[in-house]
Amino acid sequence: MPDHDHDHDHGSELGEMPLRVRALETILTEKGYVDPAALDRIVENFETKIGPRNGARVVARAWSDPGFKARLLADATAAVNSLGHVSPVGSLLIAVENTPRVHNMVVCTLCSCYPWEVLGLPPVWYKSAPYRSRAVRDPRGVLADFGVTLPADTEIRVWDSTAETRFIVLPMQPPGSEGWSEERLAELVTRDSMIGTGLAQRPAAVAP
Amino acid sequence: MNSIHDLGGMDGFGPVEPEPNEPPFHQPWEGRVLAMQRALGFTRMWTIDESRASIEALDPVTYLTSSYYKKWFLGVEHRVLEHGLVDAGEIAAGRALHPGKKLARTLTPADVPGLTRGSYDRPPAAAARFAAGDRVRTRNLNPATHTRLPRYARDKTGMVEAVRGCHVYPDTAAIGAGEQPQWLYTVVFAARELWGDDADPTLTVSIEAFEPYLEPA
């Protein structure tokens, strides 16, 4: 894919923002308010450690362990924190389950609330006006933008994240993946399937 | 505050445009802004709600034409000026002209691995007024300051689906009026209640509503 053309941004930002941001960081550092080495560590964490792989592991465990799934749906914060290999999450994470009857989708119409600990940083579209304006009124139209069509009688439930509660969608396990290891199952779990703007991948999509 | 950030239900913004293989940051400065926001949040100079309020206070044209991290940058710049941590002369000069103020704490590299989301649960001062299954009506509130009750869900009848505990109240925390913890509920509405008879009959929408937003229906 060619270089992203950044059409979400105001064109003049490209030259202006690096300078303004560097100047502010210089001032804050000189005044002892921030430590650039700590800033480096934060950026590095988001680039390497915190991302949707964490959420995919949670979903894969729920698909393969009914007891864990029950605990996840009852108290997702406690259930995720019981998994040693996933970074700890704060209160209050809520997992919502997709079924043949109901499809869940998560949005933050007021800003950009998103479960960072399990999904990483939100994508640009999640924070953008088109998604935030339409998700609560025309979710089927939004799904069409993602190439997803649901049966006409599937109920759609949209969760507007208007407080410090955070939501992760537990997508339906795709047919043909029964009995797979958690590691392989996690490969089927996309970020968008955990926001509700996508479905888990079919096994054929990741077959070796 | 009825400003441009409250986007739910608006028309005219076009299609959602997913970007394949999107990187965490498109430009290095975006990561620095996020990190400054996190590091300054750690100092407890302001609340997360005050951070949101400073972005919501941007004028509508700036809000809609600035990228996400530019909005964050403008919010950080506004808050450091507002709290007297930095003055306008320093912003203009691009360097410190005066010694820094003493802060309650600052973030060190060793703190970063343990940096998790803050906890917003608080002990309740009273029993919850509503229970799951209760019908409620949202109040028609239009404060000039920060609120988390979106316009599309004001003066609407819905049902309490879950009680989520007692939490810091953003409406007061954003304006320096304290945490004033309130019960929080998931309240679900039929799309027809929100958008009229032409709405998708298969759609329900929920908000996370603080108790002062609600009255019995």
Image (cartoon, rainbow, N blue to C red):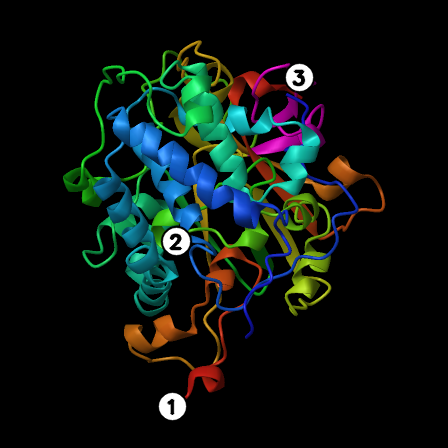
Q: Residue furthest left?
A: B110
Which residue range is magenta in the image?
B135-160
Density class for disc 3 (Cα within 10 Å; few <14, some 14-19, many ≥20) is some
Give the position of the C terminus of chain A as an image quadrant.
bottom left
Q: Residue furthest front?
A: B93
Residue B61, quarter of picture: top right
Q: Residue furthest right?
A: B198
Residue B146 among those drawn in magenta = yes
SS assignment at label 1: loop
Q: Between tags 3 and 2, which lies in front?
A: 2
**Dot 2 or dot 1, earlier in sequence:** 2
Give me the residue at 34% from left, 49% from top: A117
Location of mark 3 (residue) = B141
Residue kind at label 3, given as amino acid type:
Leu
Which chain does the residue under circle 2 lie in?
A
Looking at the image, residue A49 sits to the left or right of residue B196; the answer is left
Distance from disc 2 to disc 1, alpha carbons, whole Å, reads: 27 Å
Q: Position of residue A49 (x, y in %)?
A: 28, 57
Location of mark 2 (residue) = A120
Location of mark 1 (residue) = A208
Viewer can see residue A26: yes
Residue kind at label 2, given as amino acid type:
Gly
Give me the residue at 41% from left, 88% from top: A207
Respond whether the residues carrying marks 1 and 3 are from the same subunit.
Answer: no
